[in-house]
Amino acid sequence: MKQWLLITGTLSTLLLSACSQVSSSNNTQVYISDGYVQCEAKAQSIAITQSQLEQAGVKVLKSECAQISEQATIAMCGAGGPGIHVLTVNRYDVTKAEQLGFAEVTELDQQGLQFNRISCEE
């Protein structure tokens, strides 16, 4: 009986570990501009950006503010800034996110761009 409990416990642990590893590999990051426009509009809050995805049926697992680095930003009224919102979502929800104007972070990599995480201002 003790061996049966030990085997059952070990198998349960292995199965739960496998499930947690599978779910994390199904996640990806998407990004969108924070909406800042020089001389005109402040950056949109991360809460609003997250809400847009959630209203479209996308579960947001994590949200962060960031700035694109390695890219010149023109100083001119009406121009955007380097600020972006980076959100972790399930890979299967990427199409929904793209329909709202989001793109996968891998697209930044393909353009040779990187980003630095910053604290979000509310």
Image (cartoon, helix red, strand yellow):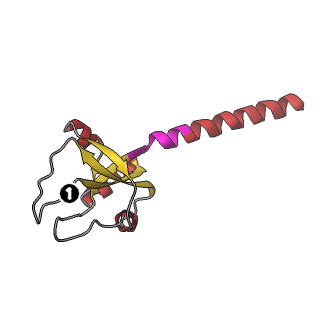
For residue 118, side relative to residue 40 (left or right): right
Dot 1: element? loop
For residue 82, side relative to residue 52 (left or right): left
Please say if 42 is above or below 108. Answer: below
Question: As drawn, which residue projects farthest toward the right?
Answer: 1
Residue in the foreground of this view, choosing between 120 and 15:
120
Task: Report the amino acid beneath label 1.
Answer: Gly
Give residue 94's position: percent from left, percent from top: 33, 51
Residue in the foreground of this view, choosing between 20 and 92:
20
Residue in the foreground of this view, choosing between 74 and 64:
74
To which quarter of the image does residue 80 belong? bottom left
User: In which quadrant will I find the C terminus?
Assistant: bottom left
User: In which quadrant will I find the N terminus?
Assistant: top right
> How packed is label 1: few (under 14 Cα within 10 Å), some, or many (20 or more)?
many
Give residue 67's position: percent from left, percent from top: 29, 50
Please tell me whether residue 23 belongs to the stretch shown in magenta.
Answer: yes
Which secondary structure type mostly characterizes the magenta part of the structure? Answer: helix
- The magenta stretch is 21-28
To which quarter of the image does residue 35 belong? bottom left
For residue 30, side relative to residue 25 (left or right): left
Give residue 121's position: percent from left, percent from top: 37, 63
Give residue 117's position: percent from left, percent from top: 37, 48
Please tell me whether residue 24 belongs to the stretch shown in magenta.
Answer: yes
| Residue sitting at x 19%, y 38% | 111
| Residue sitting at x 11%, y 65% | 77
Question: As drawn, which residue projects farthest toward the top?
Answer: 3
| Residue sitting at x 36%, y 68% | 48
Report the label total.
1
Question: As drawn, which residue projects farthest toward the front?
Answer: 75
Please say if 32 is above or below 43. Answer: above
Label 1, on which residue?
Answer: 81
